[in-house]
Image: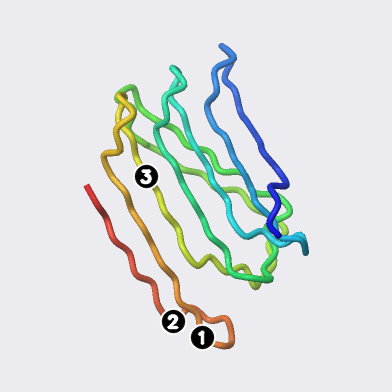
Amino acid sequence: MKVVARVVETYDSANKLRKKIVETYDSAEKLVKEIIKTYDPNEKLMEKMVKNYGLGKKLAIKSIETFEYNSDGNLTKETVETSGYNSGEEILEHIVEIYNSNGVMIEKVTENFGYDCNGRLRERVGKTFK
């Protein structure tokens, strides 16, 4: 049975929703899915990122992802700070969706990862849809 264990919402100084993170864990407290949604100042969805993890892998103790956008709404900088990651972290699928100001998805990028029996990356396949 999977349970949602953590939801984090970040607001700007005008109390507008800017980011929402939903982490889903299994009964053994292992992360199985992470969804990160980023919003513009008008609370319209700009980006949705989904990461599906392999079984039995632990999430970072701390992970902070920061996105900066220019006045046109284009992503200009992405910063990831992590600490405490288990060396066996295994992402099986990573999906990023980009939306325009009308809420229409304009781009979708998917990456699928394949690992050997020793947990070493053997395959990375990416596709971009527009």
Q: Are marks 1 and 3 in contact (CB under 8 Å)?
A: no
Could you give the CA–CA distance between mark 1 and mark 3, rounded to whole angstroms?
A: 28 Å
Could you give the CA–CA distance between mark 2 and mark 3, rounded to whole angstroms?
A: 25 Å
Q: Position of residue 89 (x, y in %)?
A: 62, 68
Of the pair 63 and 45, the residue shown nearer to us: 45
Residue 6 horizontal side relative to residue 114, left or right: right
Which residue is outermost to the left?
A: 130
Circle 1 is placed at which residue position? 116
Q: Position of residue 54 (x, y in %)?
A: 58, 69
Residue shown at the point (68%, 62%) measured from the top left:
85
In the drawing, what numbered circle is on residue 85? none
**Label 3 element class:** strand
Q: Quadrant of residue 127?
A: bottom left
* Label 1 packing within 10 angstroms: few (<14), some (14-19), many (20+): few
* Label 3 packing within 10 angstroms: few (<14), some (14-19), many (20+): many
Q: Position of residue 9 (x, y in %)?
A: 63, 31
In the drawing, what numbered circle is on residue 97? 3
Identify which amino acid the numbered label 3 is placed on.
Glu
Identify which amino acid the numbered label 1 is placed on.
Asp
- Mark 1 or mark 2: which comes first in sequence? 1
- Mark 1 or mark 3: which comes first in sequence? 3
Which residue is outermost to the right?
A: 28
Identify which amino acid the numbered label 2 is placed on.
Arg
- Mark 2 or mark 3: which comes first in sequence? 3
Which residue is outermost to the bottom?
A: 117
**Label 1 element class:** loop
Circle 2 is placed at which residue position? 122
Residue 113 horizontal side relative to residue 61, left or right: left
Could you give the CA–CA distance between mark 1 and mark 2, rounded to whole angstroms?
A: 6 Å
